[in-house]
Amino acid sequence: MQPQEIVGYIAAFFTMIAFLPQVIKSVRDQQTHDLSYGLLILQSLGSFLWSVYGIIAHSYPILIANSVTFVLVFFVLIFKFSQKNSSIKLDYIQ
């Protein structure tokens, strides 16, 4: 393994776990109101496109890190969207 690949895998590891604390906090606290849709949508799109680039460039560190990041960010985005819809329903019922 080349030194640049080692650096790539280390960077991929930190990129993958960077959003994990936010996912855990969002699920534990059952709230995402402090996260903007813009952040989540742009981060999802960026991670997705980096994953595509990783496929095209045959760069596994880029592909792995950004695919995992995409899944985590997209999960929080869906969680936020579902919370918004459930609060609308609750407001309507009350």
Image (tube, grey):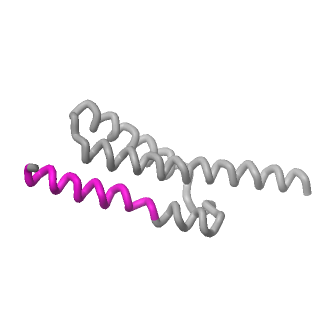
> Horizontal placement of 74 versus 11: left or right?
right
Which residues lie in the magenta part? 2-20
Between 67 and 77, the one nearer to me in the picture: 67
The percent position of residue 64, horizontal first and vertical second, equals: 32, 46
Residue 56: name its quadrant.
top left
For the C terminus, the quadrant is bottom right
Asked whether, in this view, residue 93 is left or right of residue 13, the answer is: right
- What is the residue that sits farthest to the right in this orientation? 94
Report the residue that reaches farthest toward the front.
1
- Choose between 79 and 40: the one closer to the eye: 79
Whether residue 88 is situated above or below residue 30 in the rendered picture? above
Residue located at (82% from left, 50% from top): 89
Seen in the picture, residue 45 relative to 77 is either above or below; the reply is above
Please tell me how many numbered marks the rendered image carries.
0
Q: Position of residue 43 (x, y in %)?
A: 43, 48
Q: Is residue 10 left or right of residue 73?
A: left
Q: Which residue is painted at 50% across and 50% down in the image? A: 40
Residue 13 location in percent, x, y?
Answer: 30, 58
